[in-house]
Image: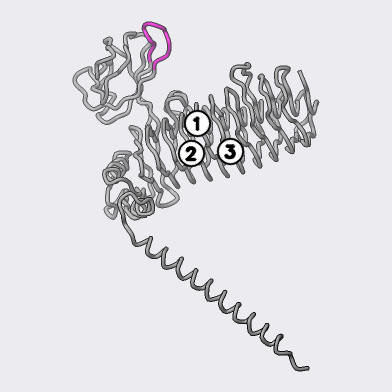
Amino acid sequence: MRSSRRELFSKMFSCANFFFASNILVSQQSNEEEKESRFSNEYISGDNRYEQKRFENFVITVGQDSTSDIQGRTEKAIQGGIDYLAKFGGGVVKVRNGVYEFSNSLFLRSGVKILGDGDEVLFLKRPAKETKLTKESDWYEAYISVEDPEFFQVGEGICIQTKNPHTGGRVVIKRTIVGIEESKLILDKPLRENVWSKRDTVISSLYPLVSGEYIQDVVIENVRLDGNKEHNPFLDGNYAGCIWLQDCKSIVLSKVEAKNYNGDGISWQIVHDLTVSQCCSHHNAGLGLHPGSGSQRARILNSKVENNDIGIFFCWGAKFGLVEGCHISNNKIGISIGHSDSYNIIRNNKIVNSYQRALLFRAEDERFIATGNIVKNNLIENLLESTGRAISLEGAHIDNKIVDNDILDNLGPYNKVGIWVGKNAKRNIIEGNRVVGFYKEISEE
C-alpha cells in the first residue's frame, strides 16, 4: 500500500529532527572537549585548576640512593623536600622504599603531598632518651639546663613535661634542639611556661612522627609509620601520635598505616574536613583514631582500626562526621562518643571482638549531651569480657537513632547486654535491631 503524502512528509520530518539533534549533541560534545582542552592549557594566577595541576606536576623524589633528588635515611631528607616545595606553593614529595629513622617530627606544609613511591616506605621513631632538669627556667627563656646534654643532638625533637608552679596542673612543651652549650639545650622557641620544678620535670625525645599545625590542602598517601612503643614512654593524643594535627583543614590520609605508638595512632584537634580512607591504625597504646576537640566533618572510610585501647574516640564537640565501611576489632572499646559530639553518622561498619563496649555513649551530664547521631546497619559481634555491653548509652544523651543493626554474640551470654540504656538518656530511637546471644537483649536502668 502506498503511503499518503502526509505520512511521507511526517517520516521525512522525523528523520530531519533525528539528524539535527544528533548534530547538536556531537557539536556540544565537541565544544565541551574544546573548552576542556583550552582550560587545561591555561595557567593563570589564582585559578584553582592551574594551581592544582601545577602542584601535581611539581615532584621531588627522596630516597636512599643517588637516583633521588634528595638522598637520606632520616626525616631531615623528607623535610628538605617538603620545605623546598612549600617555597613555591606546593607539590609532591615522592618518598622511595626504605626505612627512614626519625629523631624529630616531620613538619607538614600547606599544599604539599607526601606520597610513598612503593609499598615499603616506613617512618620509624627512634628510641627515646630521657634526662632531668638541673636549673629552673623562666617562661621567656629559650633553653633548659639538663643533667645529660650528651644524650641529645642538634635537630632532635624533645618534650618537656612538668607541673605549673602556680596551679599544679600538667604542662607539656614540644620543642626542637637548635644548639647545645655545656648543660644547656638551646630551643627553637621560648618555653612560654615557667619550668621551675626539678623533681616534677622530665625531658625526653618524644614527638609525633608527623606533625601539622595551621596548614591546609595536604595529602599523605601510601606510607607506614611505626611509633616503636617498646622503646618510648607514653605521650597522649593531645600532644602526639604517629600523626598529630591541630588547627588544620582539608587534609587527606589515604592508605596510611599507623602502628605501635605509645599513645594515639592518628590524632587531630580542631581539624575540619579531614578524610581517613583505606588506612589502618593498630597496636597503639592509646586511641586508634582520635577525631579531636571541635573537629567538623571528619570522614573515616573503609579503614581498619585494630588492637588499640579505644578504636575511634570522638572527643569534645566533634560533629557532622561519618564513619563508614570500617573494620574495628579487638579494641577495649570499639567506638566512643560523648561530650557534645553530635550529628555524626556511624553506618555499615563491622565492630568485632571488643572487650568492654563495642559502642559507648559516654556518661556526660545535660550540659554536654550527644544528640542527632545515627548508628545504622552495623554488624556488632562478640564481646570478650563477660560483663560487656555491645551498645551502651551511659549519659543524658537525647534524640539519637540506633536502628537496623545486627548485634550478635557467639561466645556465650554470661552477663552480657546487647543494648543498655541509662536512666538519663531520653528520646532516643532504638528500633529494628537484631540482638542475639546475650543474657539481656535490651536493658534499661
Q: Is disc 2 placed on a helix, strand or loop?
A: strand
Q: How far apart are marks 1 and 3 (CA)?
A: 12 Å
**Looking at the image, which residue is at 44% across and 46% down?**
221
Q: Which amino acid does label 1 sit on?
A: Ser
Q: Position of residue 433 (x, y in %)?
A: 77, 35
Q: Is disc 1 placed on a helix, strand or loop?
A: loop
**Quarter of the image that includes the C terminus:** top right
Q: Mark 2 points at which residue?
A: 274
Pick the residue in front: 18 or 339.
18
Pick the residue in front: 18 or 362.
18
**Quarter of the image that includes the N terminus:** bottom right
Asked if the residue at tag 1 contacts the one at tag 2, i.e. Cβ–Cβ closer than 8 Å, the answer is yes
- Between discs 3 and 2, the one toward the N terminus: 2
Q: Determine if the magenta segment contains residue 163.
A: yes
* Callout 1 crowding tier (Cα within 10 Å): few <14, some 14–19, many ≥20: many
- Between discs 2 and 1, the one toward the N terminus: 2
Which contiguous range is marked in magenta? 162-171
Asked if the residue at tag 3 contacts the one at tag 1, i.e. Cβ–Cβ closer than 8 Å, the answer is no
**Looking at the image, which residue is at 33% across and 9% down?**
198
Q: Is disc 3 placed on a helix, strand or loop?
A: strand
Q: Which amino acid does label 3 sit on?
A: Leu
Q: What residue type is labelled 2?
A: Leu
Q: Position of residue 48 (x, y in %)?
A: 38, 50
Q: In this view, does 285 lie to the left or right of 192?
A: right
Above or below — where is 182 with respect to 121? Answer: above
Above or below — where is 151 with respect to 408? Answer: above
* Callout 3 crowding tier (Cα within 10 Å): few <14, some 14–19, many ≥20: some
- Residue 322 is labelled as 3
**Looking at the image, which residue is at 28% across and 18% down?**
148
* Callout 2 crowding tier (Cα within 10 Å): few <14, some 14–19, many ≥20: many
- Residue 295 is labelled as 1
Q: Distance between the residues labelled 2 and 1?
A: 9 Å
